[in-house]
Image: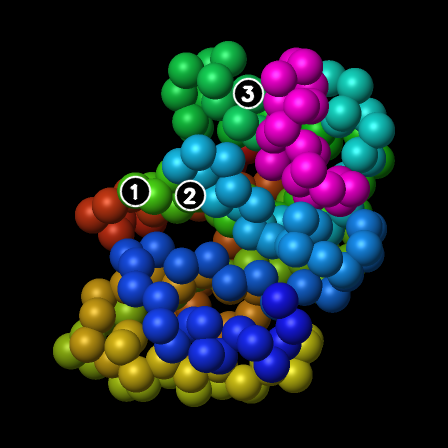
Amino acid sequence: MESNEVEPVAASVRSEIFILHLRLATDGERNFINCHPFQSGRWLFAHNGRVDREAVLKRLDYRYIASIKGLTDSEVYFYWLLQNIEHEDAVQKGLEAALRQVRKFSFTGLNFILTDGTSVYAYRGASKNEHYYSLFYLYRDPQTAGPLEYRSKEVDAFLRSKCLQQERAILICSEKLTNEAWTEIPLGSLLWVSADLIPQLIKVR
């Protein structure tokens, strides 16, 4: 959707987990099938960066290839993660295996947010421009946190949430949205946030 369509849609959505991707498009036409987040079953995924689409595509099982609808490297990356999760039969092990392999290919940024509707996983990886491919998380306590209002320096979008004033939440973002105590996710690290909102950082070796 276009930028001016985001606010009315966002105002009507209710969920325990949200993924919002304000995209500066690189690969693929600007249309619905190339837009983040990508969805497959219970999984949602958004990516910041670029990976070698053809190198990853060659390693996908046929049924994942058949699921690809658009022309972006990000969607191929998404199915690569899902394929490895299925092969390992454990999310963390699958993500680590997928990332170890994809880091051997050409890429700029591997940053992603992935959720199965219960847990959230976020990874930060970059081959260059490490400060540009930043990723942070914040635990917000409703007893101390006020409304969130912020204008993104990257895409010049104004973000506002009054709901977060009353909700315990973890925010994950490429920018620090407030003056609160955000934690930077180190390069090469995977953040896992379970339903109890306890964040765990895992170094992917």
In which quadrant will I find the C terminus? top right
Residue named by callout 3: 84
Q: Are marks 3 and 1 in contact (CB under 8 Å)?
A: no
- 134 relative to 3, above or below: above
Q: Is residue 177 left or right of residue 77?
A: left
Q: Which amino acid lies under the numbered mark 1 shown in the image of this protein?
A: Thr
Q: Secondary structure at mark 1?
A: loop
Pick whichever of labels 3 and 1 is earlier in the sequence: 3
Q: Residue at x 30, y 64 (%)?
A: 14
Residue 199 x/y as whole percent: 33, 49
From mark 3 to mark 1, how far is it between C-alphas?
19 Å
* Numbered range of the magenta stretch: 60-80
Residue named by callout 2: 115
Pick whichever of labels 3 and 2 is earlier in the sequence: 3
| Res. 118 mark | 1
- 106 relative to 135, above or below: above
Residue 188, quarter of the rendered image: top right
Q: Are marks 1 and 2 in contact (CB under 8 Å)?
A: yes
Q: Is residue 177 left or right of residue 125?
A: left
How crowded pointer 3 is (Cα within 10 Å; few <14, some 14-19, many 20+) is rated as: many
Q: Which amino acid lies under the numbered mark 3 shown in the image of this protein?
A: Asn
Question: Is residue 26 something one can see in this rendering?
Answer: yes
Q: Residue at x 20, y 48 (%)?
A: 196
Q: Secondary structure at mark 3?
A: helix
Residue 119 x/y as whole percent: 33, 42
